[in-house]
Image: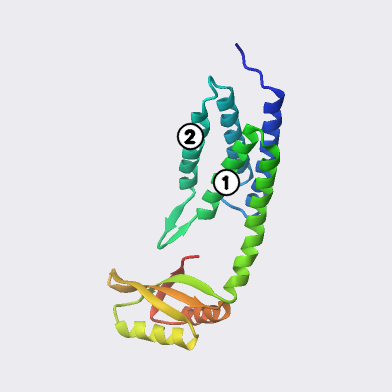
Amino acid sequence: MEFLPENNDLIALGVSILAGSLVGLEREYKNKSAGFRTIVLICLGATAFTIASRHGVGSDDRIAANIITGIGFIGAGVIFKDKFSVMGLTTAAVIWMVAGIGMAAGIGYYGLSITLSVLTVLVLAMFNKVEHAMERIFLTRTLLVVFHDMDVKNLEELRRAMDNHHIKYARKTISKRAGKLSVVFELTADRKNLQHFNNEMMGLVYVEEFYYNS
């Protein structure tokens, strides 16, 4: 027998598209890898599978439960490690959250679905400002420095430069790459002092390159 969607199912799909669009627009505005269409489709897909689980024989909840497992693979796909930093964790968390929003719409909790999408946008927008405000007072970054050679004196010079800029530091790792000294530091400073230190590093002849974790 051909399945025809019920009115409640159509409402759930509409709410899912609306809720996903709210989050998707924010992600598209921030130019993230999972943009508007991706977020909406994830939300709509979670809703569709949840609806299918409700109409299954005996209301098979295993379909809805497996959404969580399946969405994990999508989330893992947007996380990648670049040198010594990990990127994409927030995007993965958004994908996970949007799947939950879609499931709420599929169950019939329309108000909860919209509320969760609004809260997600608020967290992404407002908490980002809170993080920037905190960074003005307390900023922690992981720094990788590659020196031109293996001369340890250059490392001592760099440490003195950090002290001059009132930067607290802890050496995490030290290694040799192609005859060059490579050191990873964890730095703690305010944004202004760190910026001045970065400007000085740009002119240090014994520093070949340096990277931050974000």
Q: Name the residue under label 2.
A: 66
Under mark 1, the amino acid is: Met
Q: Are there few (<14), some (14-19), or many (20+) residues within 10 Å of tag 2?
A: few
- Does residue 34 appear to the left or right of 180 in the view shown? right
Question: In terms of image quadrants, where is residue 137?
Answer: bottom right
- Tag 1's secondary structure? helix
Question: Tag on residue 97?
Answer: 1
Residue at horizontal 57 percent and vertical 49 percent from the top: 94
Q: Are marks 1 and 2 in contact (CB under 8 Å)?
A: no
Looking at this view, is 107 or 31 the one in front? 107
Q: Position of residue 14 (x, y in %)?
A: 70, 34
Q: Position of residue 143 (x, y in %)?
A: 43, 71
- Does residue 171 appear to the left or right of 115 in the view shown? left
Question: In terms of image quadrants, where is residue 104?
Answer: top right
Q: In this view, does 75 lie above or below 191?
A: above
Q: Is residue 196 above or below residue 128?
A: below
Q: Earlier in the sequence, mark 1 or mark 2?
A: 2
Calculate the distance from the C-alpha at mark 1 to the C-alpha at mark 2.
15 Å
Q: Position of residue 13 (x, y in %)?
A: 67, 32
Residue at horizontal 50 percent and vertical 54 percent from the top: 89
For the N terminus, give its image quadrant.
Answer: top right
